[in-house]
């Protein structure tokens, strides 16, 4: 009887905690579940008509994606944070100018704005001179204490491997794996030929993957 | 590494909760400032200031009387 009561209490406790976390996530803008393209376009229409909740939902759909893509392209956390802010603001205030195009998702428009924001910001000050050794220190910064150890190791290895690529290749792989854009969408965002993007993606995926594996397992053990 | 492993690796670059809160706060601040400045502009157009408003109305009336034939006729009668 005591066991049954304890189980009921534990289940209630679990439910309460789950609800509490859900409420907190909602309060602090926790990432919303990924929506399909039709739902996204309905949100865009509602946000254009002045629905602030729709605008907030669109923001939550893309803010993390924009940040991780920019973090892959740029060489500093601070730059990625600032570009994400500017880009999300530009997206939310330019929704009236968005025109859906066949074969291109809303995410591609968001990422095109983000890449252009980064390029405008660093037209004069290219973030190219960062010492790769500095990238190794990034996860030890106070700002990253909240990340778990595995995530920090992966992040450090990925950033080091990305630092060895040229700017164009970094943009292409970041848009592919950070934003889940396909080669055609990437080609449109960067004004390149889709065939060229496919070729670069294939070559860079192999190189990047091998480098990350080597950085994560320097003794050659496979994951 | 295959496609899905690379996609998964990129999730390690997501903002920390603290970074995310900073981004949220700044974007929210800009949006609210933009909304309130637009609202203030509209309210400013509708605002009625009785003292200044009546002063301008009296001045405009005098100018009409002084600068048009209606005013000249009125002054000649007086």
Image (cartoon, grey):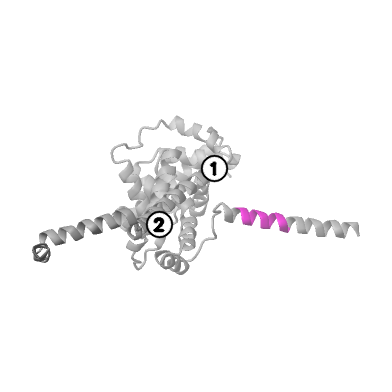
Q: Is residue A127 magenta?
A: no
Q: Identify which residue, A189 or A43, lies in the foreground.
A: A43
What residue is rendered at 55% in x and 60% in y? A33
What is the chain identity of the residue bearing mark 2? A
Q: Quadrant of residue A95?
A: bottom left
Q: Identify which residue, A43 or A195, lies in the foreground.
A: A43
Q: What quarter of the picture does the C terminus of chain A occupy?
A: top right
Q: Identify which residue, B59 or A110, lies in the foreground.
A: B59
Q: Quadrant of residue A118?
A: top left
Q: Identify which residue, A61 or A101, lies in the foreground.
A: A61
Give the residue pinned by disc 2. A92
Q: Is residue A161 above or below residue A90?
A: above
x then y, percent, for residue B18: 54, 42
x then y, percent, for residue A7: 82, 58
Q: Is residue A41 above or below residue A19?
A: below
Magenta span dominant secondary structure: helix
Q: What quarter of the picture does the N terminus of chain A occupy?
A: bottom right
Which mark identifies residue B18?
A: 1
Do discs 1 and 2 share a chain?
A: no
Query: Would you say the residues marked 1 and 2 are in contact, meaning their CB atoms lie under 8 Å apart?
Result: no
Residue range of the region highlighted in magenta in the rendering? A15-24
């Amino acid at each position: 009887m005591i066991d049954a009561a304890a189980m009921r209490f534990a289940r209630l406790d679990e439910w309460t905690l789950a609800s509490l976390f859900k409420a907190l996530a909602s309060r602090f803008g926790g990432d919303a579940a990924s929506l399909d393209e039709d739902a996204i376009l309905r949100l865009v229409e509602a946000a254009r008509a002045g629905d602030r909740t729709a605008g907030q939902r669109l923001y939550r759909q893309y803010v993390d994606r924009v940040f991780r893509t920019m973090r892959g392209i740029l060489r500093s956390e601070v730059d990625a944070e600032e570009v994400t802010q500017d880009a999300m603001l530009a997206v939310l205030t330019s929704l009236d100018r968005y025109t859906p195009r066949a074969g291109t998702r809303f995410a591609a428009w968001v990422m095109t704005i983000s890449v252009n924001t980064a390029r405008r910001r660093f037209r004069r000050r290219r973030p190219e001179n960062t010492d790769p050794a500095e990238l190794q220190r990034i996860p030890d910064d106070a700002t990253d204490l909240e990340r778990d150890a595995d995530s920090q190791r992966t992040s450090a290895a990925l950033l080091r491997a990305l630092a060895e690529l040229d700017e164009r290749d970094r943009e292409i792989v970041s848009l592919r794996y950070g934003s889940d854009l396909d080669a055609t969408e990437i080609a449109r965002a960067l004004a390149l030929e889709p065939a060229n993007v496919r070729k670069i993606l294939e070559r860079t995926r192999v190189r990047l993957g091998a480098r990350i594996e080597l950085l994560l397992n320097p003794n050659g053990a496979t994951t | 590494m295959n496609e899905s492993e690379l996609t998964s690796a990129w999730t390690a670059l997501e903002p920390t909760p603290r970074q995310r809160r900073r981004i949220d706060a700044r974007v929210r601040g800009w949006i609210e400032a933009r909304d309130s400045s637009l609202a203030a502009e509209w309210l400013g157009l509708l605002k009625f200031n009785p003292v200044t408003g009546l002063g301008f109305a009296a001045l405009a009336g005098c100018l009409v009387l002084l600068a048009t034939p209606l005013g000249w006729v009125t002054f000649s009668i007086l």
